[in-house]
Image (cartoon, helix red, strand yellow):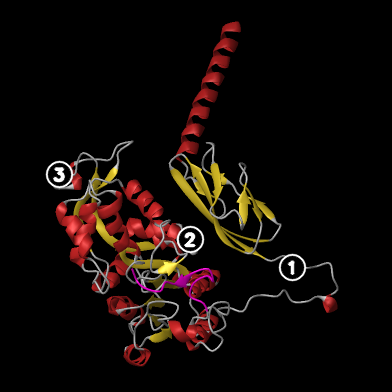
Amino acid sequence: MKNIKKITALLLAASIIVTGFGTTENTSAATIKLKKKNVSLEVGQSVKLKVLGTKKKVAWSSANKSIATVNKKGKVTAKKKGKTVINAKVTNKTLKCTVKVTLKKSVDEPQATQMPTPTAVPLSQNWTSDSAAAAKLKSYVSKVTNEADKTNFIPKKDRIAVFDMDGTLTCETYFSYYDTMMFIEYCLKDHPEKASDELKKTASEIGPGYTATAELAKSFAKAYAGMTIQELYNYAVEFGKKNTTSFNNMRYIDGFYLPMVELVKYLYENDFTIYVVSGTERTTTRAIIANSPIKDYVTPNHVIGTEFEVKLKGHETEASNMDYKYADGDELVITGGFIQKNLNANKSIYIEREIGQRPVLAFGNSGSDTSMMNYAIDKRNPYPAEAYMIIADDNVREWGNQDWTKKSAEYTAMGYTPISMKNEFAKIYPDTITRAATQK
């Protein structure tokens, strides 16, 4: 009898061990995900987020702590009106939850005495009160965000706006054109020991009125050969802290047009996804955007730019990336090779390749942006779409010399809405920044 009891106990223990082992396997194989991917809170409210499918430690972080914070246990607290992303990093996976914060509604006062919360009028701070483009944009946004408007309503997932960067979001005249001046500084001042005589010659010959060709971009790629992606990013950030001589009190990173910053924020708050589609190399563009006034509205994966060839360090001369594999600690380096200049037709091609659908709003400033504009307003777009062109006609606050009458007629005929910097931008830069007496 004692032996029978002993055998029974051993079998029971074995059953428990096997069952426990099976349970552990099922848990580890479960999909790791956030219980909530979207949260709406009023200022002051909190919610606790939970990661499902794992018991491993989660590292929580907020993309914008001024809008919402998160503690180490996943408790999110709303701070001010706006929208941000809460990141939950577990193992090698980063999960994201979008948090929209609205103003707190008053429930303490009688209805009769409640006053509406004052809100800023959209596109009024840096746009002139009689701006035709601002009025048209506000009318458009009002229609496409109104669910009751069956003809014009666009679902949030399809509200995509694309912006050129240089000359559209930020100044691009010589002595302030970010990536060109960065190349000149790198070759002639910061690292002349790394630049070939040919590259130094190219850098020294660039002057006002130059054209940003694919050939010039190939020289940029050669100049940065051997740099890791992170090193190029860091150099672009440091370069942005230097002063341009074309303006008083302006660093290169300070060249963003205030009206366009206001516009990007306005679209973001109306649930548009913002992409920057630039002729500047992608890593450099990411560095610029991440340190700019629109950093909270454009994520790194929403940047499309010119492409330099990149390989793993130590494999730069191998013909195919299929011949080797990435390992822990490997570095991505620029080889000096060149893939594409993101202008003209490439803008439409890479929008399709990377976004996979037509934008409904497009903003540019030159002929090299027209492919992007035309792609958005193509009659096959299932949604109402509009395109806008900035005309650099202000030669007092900026260095613009475009003829408004000629350019506005040209762009209107192409189906775009022209925007006059001179007459529709109430402010271009902060008051501390003024145009220098000469471009030098």
User: Is residue 128 rendered to the left or right of residue 42?
Assistant: left
Label 3 sits on residue: 318
Q: Which residues are magenta?
A: 427-440
Helix, strand or loop status at disc 1: loop
Residue 218 in view here? no
Q: CA distance from mark 3 to mark 1?
A: 62 Å
Please tell me whether the stretch drawn in magenta is mainly helix, strand or loop: loop
The spot of residue 305 in percent (x, y) is: 31, 63
> Contact (CB < 8 A) between labels 1 and 2?
no
Q: Spot the residue most to the front.
A: 437
Foreground label between 1 and 2: 2
Mark 2–mark 3 Cα distance, whole angstroms, equals 37 Å
Establish if 372 lies above or below 303. below
Residue 433 in the magenta stretch? The answer is yes
Give percent across and percent down for residue 45: 70, 56
Q: Quadrant of the C terminus?
A: bottom left
Distance from label 1 to label 2 (Cα)?
Answer: 29 Å
Residue 105 disc label? 1
Which of 272 and 31 lies nearest the eye of the viewer?
Answer: 272
Q: Residue at x 80, y 67 (%)?
A: 107
Q: Which residue is mark 2?
A: 295
Instruction: Please tell me whether residue 37 belongs to the stretch shown in magenta.
Output: no
* Foreground disc of the pair 2, 3: 2
Q: Secondary structure beneath disc 2?
A: loop
**Residue 177: which quarter of the image?**
bottom left
x and y percentages locating residue 69 in the rendered image:
62, 51
Say which quadrant the N terminus sits in: top right
In the visual, does 330 lie left or right of 252? left
